[in-house]
Image (cartoon, rainbow, N blue to C red):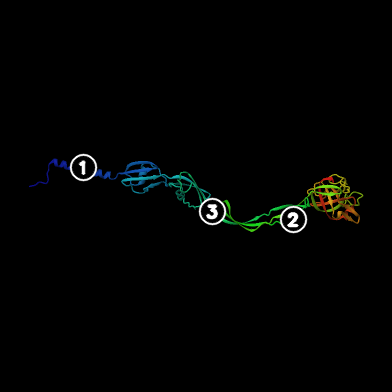
Amino acid sequence: MVRYFTSSPKFFKVTAFVILMLMMTGTAILYLSNFKWATVYVNGETYRCVTLAESVEEVLEEIGLELREEDYVYPPRENKLKRMAAIAVVHAQPYVINHDGMRTEIWSVGPKVADVLLGAGLSWQEQDIITPPVESTAAGSEITLVRVSSEHIQEAVTLPYAVIRVANDSLYRGQERLVQSGINGRQVNNIKAVYHDNQLVERKVISSELVVAAQDKIVEYGTISSISRGGLKIGISRVLDVQSTAYCSGVEGTGCPVDARGYSQCTGKATGYTATGRKAKAGDGSRNNPYIIAVDPKVIPLGTLCYLSFKGGGVTTRHGRIITDGFALAADTGSAIKGNRIDILFDNHWVAWYYGRRKVRVFIVESVTAE
């Protein structure tokens, strides 16, 4: 008969030992089954650890790795940790982006400039200027995005006419004659305007269309530099065609009306002298005793020797031939004598009165020599 049980002390000891070993082995297996082996790669450095952590984030905290929200972690931080885990971490870098008149600060793990811009929520057009270029490595800390835009404009342009001066040996110095009037031209330019961040940086003419051609102004100028009068060669610098009137000195003996205040009709408070201090006495038109004329010093400087040329060689009134062509000295001024106008001094008020208003040619004298 076979016996299946025994009460031998040895049997119980062996059985207890086996049970204990099985329990210890089970406990060890259960304990060891919770351990995980993790390798963490951070910007070129490697960390290895055995951990009981449940998630990727717990492992990173155990190794004392400080992270920003923008840092890249793979597998994601919230993932459960596998028994044999490899974790990659890329730290974000700070960047400043200059764009649209602003400065935006951002942390990014993007390897290229384009990644950093996209991370900041910025888009761009092909023509925009980005520094450094979008495909380059985002190594620097500052990126500039310049918005480039353009528009085409039609612009009307005035083409000024040119003035062409032609010598004419039949005119005196200072005389001019208009041969052809000048007309401004007109041109339409097609312009491409380029803007950087809405600021104009370039205007380039793409094409032009001539609408009206400019017409040059043609002016003839005199070259005659001297005249011959009475055996004298008179060198002239210019000639003026002016309006002339006449006056007297207003002193006693001239017949000039005087008011109750003692002011004469021609000169007001009569002194008997001109503005240059010369005695106000009419000349005879000779080189040594020229006529006295009042002038506008802006047109004919005081002290200038002139030669007067009248139509018909002189002026005849009821008083006879009161003046003929001859030399005159710019020695006086008058409040009414402005621009191309002169006033001729006579010794008698009524002779001056009947002179009236007449055109006279005034030669500005440079030199006088005998022929």
Mark 3: which amino acid?
Answer: Ser
Q: Is residue 157 above or below residue 273?
A: below
Residue 133: horizontal and vertical position, in percent? Answer: 48, 47
Question: Closer to the observer: label 2 or label 3?
Answer: 2
Mark 2: which amino acid?
Answer: Leu
Badge 3: residue crowd in 10 Å (few <14, some 14–19, many ≥20): some
Question: Closer to the observer: label 1 or label 3?
Answer: 3
Question: Closer to the observer: label 2 or label 1?
Answer: 2
Residue 2: horizontal and vertical position, in percent? Answer: 9, 47
Badge 1: residue crowd in 10 Å (few <14, some 14–19, many ≥20): few
Q: CA distance from mark 1 to mark 3?
A: 82 Å
Query: 302 or 57: nearer the eye?
Result: 302
Residue 45: horizontal and vertical position, in percent? Answer: 38, 41
Q: CA distance from mark 2 to mark 3?
A: 50 Å
* 175 with respect to 8 (left or right): right
Badge 2: residue crowd in 10 Å (few <14, some 14–19, many ≥20): few
Helix, strand or loop at mark 1: helix
Residue denoted by label 2: 178
Sequence-first tag of 2 and 3: 3
Residue denoted by label 1: 21
Q: Is residue 335 visible?
A: no
Helix, strand or loop at mark 3: strand
Helix, strand or loop at mark 2: strand
Sequence-first tag of 2 and 1: 1
| Label 1 with label 3: CB-CB less than 8 Å | no
Sequence-first tag of 1 and 3: 1
Residue ranking furthest to the bottom: 211
Residue denoted by label 3: 149
* 214 with respect to 191 (left or right): right
* 44 with respect to 343 (left or right): left
